[in-house]
Amino acid sequence: MGEVKAQDQKYIANTYKRFDLEIARAEGAYCYDESGKRYIDLSTGIAVNTFGACDKEWVAAVTEQLSLVTHASNLYYTAPQVRLAELLCKRTGAKKVFFANSGAEANECVIKVARKWGKDNKGESFFNVVTLKNSFHGRTIATLKATGQDVFHKDFGPFPDGFLYCDAGNCEMLKTLVCENDCCAIMLECVQGEGGVMALDKEFVSFAKRLCEEKNLLLIIDEVQTGNGRCGTLYAYEQYGIKPDLVSTAKGLGGGLPIGAAMLFERCEGVLSYGDHGSTFGGNPVACAGAYSILSRIDDALLAGVRERSKLIFDTLSCADGVVSVSGLGLMIGIETKRDASEVISRCMDAGLLVIKAKNKVRLLPPLNIELDTLKEALDILTDCLKQTII
Ligand SMILES: *Cc1c(COP(=O)(O)O)cnc(C)c1O
């Protein structure tokens, strides 16, 4: 660990404040440092390892594809890409899919689609996208600007124009922004993940949907973190009773390999034409074969299990010593703690449990199929570390 840490600090750009832990090996809900110490991992590489690390079926699907064709450019057809796109469309009602390699890139795509749709359907000036304050949409220049948090904006301007920010939950403000500016879309995360695991109100989301219908805008849902079963339904928007026009996803879709997807629904399915967008790696056959193995197993039984595990966590933590409140949806959970969140996290790490932060909260993103006994063991450690007075 000492050497890896030193070399990392020497050669890796200083963008990550890492925990003092080298992950040498991982399997299911467990990972191990180089000394062999075992941790229960409730962070899943930030909602990526959907079925835990190195899930056997996923490994088999990826391995098989690796020796068939690892990469082919998008100048040619490949079966894994088509199979995954078909599954995404059948499961969501989307009409078309564009594959990217990350969440930010998936968001770049949905923003491009919304802008072109606005231009084609409403006029040149209808490029504005209303996003929410406290949102997170990525780290590229455009998705940073879409992110409604000033902290991300310092140092990197000038940014592209065309993003307006609304307070989450403020229907009046949303209406005013949409009425007073030439807009093509409203974009939101049903649960703001990086913003502190804050689920939006149902009323606000349905209001946004109605506004999109009345004012002829597209509704974009960023499901990069909330999607792929994480919140207890395949996509979180299903629990809000709305139909989106564009959905971006990534993280958990790949189950451990980089992939992003932009899903285009009926109103904008024909917006992109030849040359409008592209990606060298997008829809990589290996990543797609892995994603297919994940997506095809997120069925009703699995989702019922997610909701059962979610209830266990909410029930256990809501009345636990040292907890102020518990927020989130499904297995995307934020804990407002009496102790400093970072202190809780490092105490957990010492005790063999990996949890992460979101704003001032402790964030849990367990594998969707974590064994109940393992989850209970993790919650025992967590509730201990949350206590204000330690014996
Ligand atoms: C993580 C995240 C992104 C960015 O995804 P990357 O793969 O890191 O580019 C975008 N939107 C949301 C909601 C996210 O949680």
Image (cartoon, grey):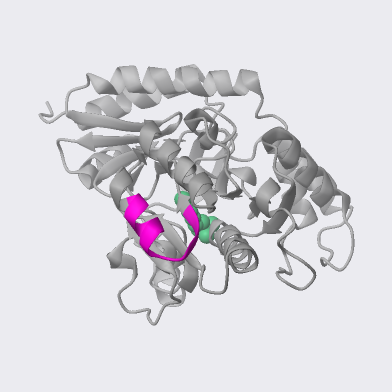
Query: Who is closer to the viewer here, 9 or 313?
Result: 313
Task: State which quadrant residue 390 falls in.
Answer: top left
Query: Who is closer to the viewer here, 185 or 6?
Result: 185
Q: Position of residue 181 (x, y in %)?
A: 40, 65
Q: Position of residue 281 (x, y in %)?
A: 72, 65
Q: Is 228 colored magenta in this rendering?
A: no
* Residue located 70% across and 69% down the image: 277
Q: Is 180 colored magenta in this rendering?
A: yes
Q: Where are the magenta residues, as a range?
A: 174-186
* Total tally of numbered discs in the picture: 0
Query: Who is closer to the viewer here, 247 or 21?
Result: 247
Check the image and report above or below for 26 versus 331.
below
Residue 250 visible in the snapshot: yes
Q: Quadrant of the N terminus?
A: bottom left
Position of residue 300 in the picture relative to residue 156 (left or right): right
Query: Who is closer to the viewer here, 89 or 359?
Result: 89
